[in-house]
Image (spheres, rainbow, N blue to C red):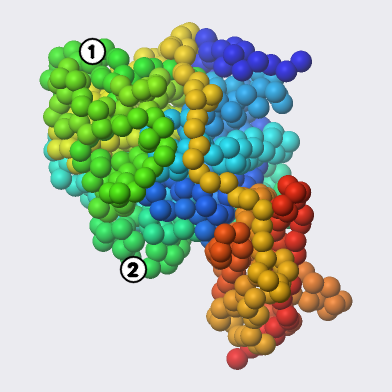
Amino acid sequence: MPVSRRTVLTRTAIGSATLAAATVPGMSDALGVPAAAAPDSGGYEIGVGLSDITGPAAECGMMGYSQLEQQTAGIHLRPRARAFIIGGAGRRIVFVVAENGMIFQSVHRGVLTELARRFGDLYTEQNVLLTSTHSHATCGGSSNDYAYNLSILGFQQQVYDAEVNGIVEAIAAAHADLGPGSLSLGRAELHNASVNRSRVAWELNPPADKEHFPDAIDPAVTTLVLRKGGRTAGTITWFATHNTSMTNTNRLISSDNKGYAAFSAEHIEHGVRYLDGKPAFVAAFAQTNAGDMSPNLNLRQGSGPTEDEFENTRILGERQYTASKEAVAQARSISGPVDGTLCYIDLADIAVDGRFTPDGMPRRTAPAAAGVSLIAGSVEDGPGLPGGPIPEGVRNPFIESLGDPAQPAPVWLADAQAPKAIAVPLGLLPPVPWVPNVVPIQLVRIGELYLAAAGGEFTITSGLRIRKAVAAALSVPLEQVLMQGYANAYHEYVTTPEEYDSQQYEGASTLFGRYTLCAYQQEFTRLATAFAARGPVPRGPAPRDVSQLQPNFQPGAGPDAAAPGRDFGDVLVQPHPSYGPGDQVLAEFVSAHPKHDNRRNGTFLEVQRRNASGEWVRVANEGEWAVKYHWSKRGLAESVARFTWDIPLDAEPGRYRFQHYATRLDPGGALYPLTGTTDEFELVRR
């Protein structure tokens, strides 16, 4: 019998931290003491899985930069979900890294509901941790929160389905892959992949905080290595930098710099071919406290280390990949139980004890409000206000359907949010608050590593204070605790009170007021204290479900048409007869609207080579780094697919061709697959 959503969300809400204290105080497996377990016999169950979460490659608003005109028009590097299941001593945790903009509560809820249908109460909100790499070059519209759908023109079912189904598929694959294994943990530092984009605000922090980050960045690289069957099955690498090397003028779906880091580890180093079934190795590059960390090293969007966004994406990804390998090289075995616990807090109304405030006075959080500086956005990474700025004279039917968001803030809210100058009182808008206020916080233990997970973009100093609070409650060294941001929900930024006072972009985006971080410190202390004592943790207030209140004004894709004298799959631009390594091949096809078939876990293009037997075999495909897919529309319903392939320097000489796949919709509503094939071309050594 299927398990209800209510059952899966509540069944383990009390008393989940049953093993946490067993080795915490004075633990014999404390960091720095080599574990006695032999390689691959660490007493863990380990499984890894991967799936595709790519949304519509045409006419879908992109998530992150809030630009109404930034709609998808092709694919650069397919975003994927990577899942890791780790079990030990009768407990399991699921850790997922999704290469999307955010994990919204709608997706969190949808994943848990489907896991309950498939697995009963094995995987629940208590032991499942969903995180995002925060790529700004992926599809938006999976949220049920109005503020995050403004520039997307509403909720997009296709995007939601791609993310939920892809994440669940990755978890199911990891579940099927479970087997005995071991864990090791390594650390390194990376100093040339991030810069503090809000240095003015950061400088307001006390000297003790600033001394922890001499360069005003968090250089820590932490890599968890999962081994089974005599080989490395996967790695998870945490490093704080925004996934915003691709700019707000880009229209190709891309997993950005962290996606390239994963591609480097999986495809380039380990030879993973994403269309060949179960991968032998899975590498995830997760976020931590990246709120004020930018990859745009010259403090301008799309600038640093070069002025080319694709090259910046590659370089920043490669640097993270290289640092991960350095961490792996000195990793040592770890032991200890695995466990997780989660509860919900209402960020709009938390009484904060004076122990957690800068002046020692009791304070309160407030309903969400966006500050004026949020509208201006981050100069370094792109504009800010969800759904804005909307250019003057441009009509947004989504906003019109809900009413004018530019409501004056009441005096009491202005006082509660001071010194923020309120632009939009998001928490007071009809028909329901435009951002979530009841959000989860979670604590996950993986042997000697603890993840304090929450749905905000925490600055490095905010993350440091959370880590200190959790480490103190657990009586473990600070380095054993990571701040896992972008987790299970999304509500924008969390700055320190001192940073908040400067009302830079991050402070104006700290929606629940000056004492948001203080509330988090208090609530994480409560959660960690119960976790260490193996005490019950009340679930807290119920998160809202407003999935039934979701307008959508994004035009759909109607029947496809081909130009007169043309048929679907025809080649409009043929490749040249011959090329050499390092050249770029280009071809164009009469195609169909990508919304008719995302081709998730598939491809729109194969680069094929004829082997010695005369058979055509795939050597590259759309979704990999060297291949780019550009979609464009001609007239009202004609789609053109343009593909480029940057020939690798080590490509084998021989006969090649492109083969394009899509699905067209006819006027009667029927779907038909289409295929187009170019002329052959020769690859020669020069």
Quadrant for residue 271, please give it: bottom right
Q: Secondary structure at mark 2?
A: loop
Is residue 449 at least partly visible in the picture?
no
Residue placed farthest to the bottom in the image? 686
Q: Nearer the viewer, residue 146 or 236?
A: 146
Residue at 43 percent across and 59 percent down: it is: 250
Q: Left or right of 379: which side holds 537?
A: right
Q: Position of residue 427 (x, y in %)?
A: 32, 23
Q: Position of residue 503 (x, y in %)?
A: 17, 37
Q: Position of residue 180 (x, y in %)?
A: 69, 35
Residue at 42 percent across and 53 percent down: it is: 70
Closer to the chain start, of discs 1 and 2, is 2
Q: Amino acid at mark 1?
A: Asp
Is residue 496 at least partly visible in the picture?
yes
**Which part of the image, by quadrant, shows the C terminus?**
bottom right
Q: Nearer the viewer, residue 109 or 609?
A: 109
Measured along the vertical axis of the image, is residue 306 above or below residue 333? Answer: below
What whole-number distance in Å separates the C-alpha atoms at marks 1 and 2?
48 Å
Q: Amino acid at mark 2?
A: Glu
Measured along the vertical axis of the image, is residue 37 above or below residue 124? Answer: below
Q: Position of residue 48 (x, y in %)?
A: 64, 41
Quadrant for residue 398, please give it: top left
* Residue under label 1: 353
Residue placed farthest to the right in the image? 613
Residue at 47 percent across and 19 percent down: it is: 544
Q: Secondary structure at mark 1?
A: loop
Are there few (<14), some (14-19), or many (20+) residues within 10 Å of tag 2? some
* Residue under label 2: 307
Q: Left or right of 678: which side holds 184?
A: left
Q: Nearer the viewer, residue 117 or 142?
A: 142
Measured along the vertical axis of the image, is residue 181 above or below residue 246? Answer: above
Are there few (<14), some (14-19), or many (20+) residues within 10 Å of tag 1? some
